Image (spheres, rainbow, N blue to C red):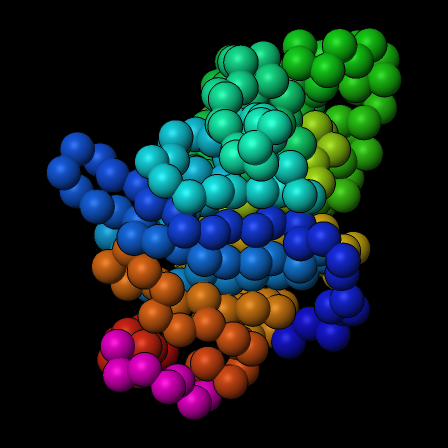
Amino acid sequence: MSTRPSEAVTPKVEITGLHKFFGELHVLKGIDLTVRPGSVTVLIGPSGSGKSTLLRCVNELEPIDAGRVRVDGELIGMREEVKADGSIVLHALTDRQRAAQRARIGMVFQRFNLFPHMTALENVTEAPVQVKGMGRAEARRLGLELLERVGLADRVGHYPSQLSGGQQQRVAIARALAMDPELMLFDEPTSALDPELVGEVLQVMKDLAADGMTMVVVTHEMGFAREVGDQLVFMDGGVICESGDPVTVLDDPQQERTRAFLASVL
């Protein structure tokens, strides 16, 4: 388990009363969750429990139906106006404002979503150039540095089809880091990989955690949760059933539903 400092004035992520519907399907049912700066929060639970939807709401890939999501104290997707009588009116942000918020949050998906016609280096440098207006030479230097950081300095000119699944996922992590995010979200980043390739991706994530990156990770890798996590959250049926110190939750779960899930995966 991590031993990084936990003291913080403002949470990196603060979720209160979050609800999400898809039609009549109530996917998230009043989620409250706080993530400290520099910490690793691991979300576990069965398929369909709402874990991935929760990440997508934080990153504004899905609009929320009720509740609030704040990153570094800033409301995500909306702007608050305080009226003279003290009441608060919410206004939706413009697409440009929402894009600016999203650019501060890196996300790594289960599927790597790399551009197949671009090399590893081109995949990493595209967003800094197109979104942040970074010069090509500066973006190239950054891309080379990040690919070296994820152990792919010898693969910069390779196309996705020439890379293993683990290498493609590490390129995807480097691509997310190229935007200099304040928060990294990982949505089952190893579940599409062959078992022998999982370790190389988890090692990159462990290194990021050691460097102090705030991370929220949806995963079934309980060893990673135990070793790296600061907070373990078990979700089922769109609610948080149990949360706490990873070692405590894994070794001594308090809820019967948590015990049953862990018995099925450990």
- Identify the residue shown where x is 37% and y is 64%: 240
| Image quadrant occupied by the C terminus | bottom left
Residue 13: x and y in percent read: 60, 49
Instruction: Determine whether 170 is above or below 195 in the image.
Output: above
Instruction: Determine whether 43 is above or below 160 in the image.
Output: below
> Looking at this rendering, what residue extends furthest in the bottom direction?
252
Q: Quadrant of residue 182?
A: top right
Q: Is residue 143 magenta?
A: no
Q: Is residue 29 left or right of residue 33?
A: left
Residue 7: x and y in percent read: 77, 67
| Image quadrant occupied by the N terminus | bottom right
**What span is in magenta?**
251-257
> Looking at this rendering, what residue extends furthest in the left direction?
24
Residue nearest the observer in this picture, 142 or 228: 228
Residue 205: x and y in percent read: 63, 54
- Identify the residue shown where x is 79% and y is 13%: 134
> Looking at this rendering, what residue extends furthest in the front direction?
85
Residue 183: x and y in percent read: 65, 43
Q: Is residue 220 left or right of residue 203?
A: left
Q: Is residue 209 left or right of residue 115?
A: right
Residue nearest the observer in this picture, 14 or 157: 14
- Identify the residue shown where x is 66% and y is 50%: 12
Instruction: Determine whether 247 is above or below 132 in the image.
Output: below
- Identify the residue shown where x is 50% and y is 28%: 89
| Residue 200 in view | no
Q: Is residue 206 left or right of residue 202?
A: right
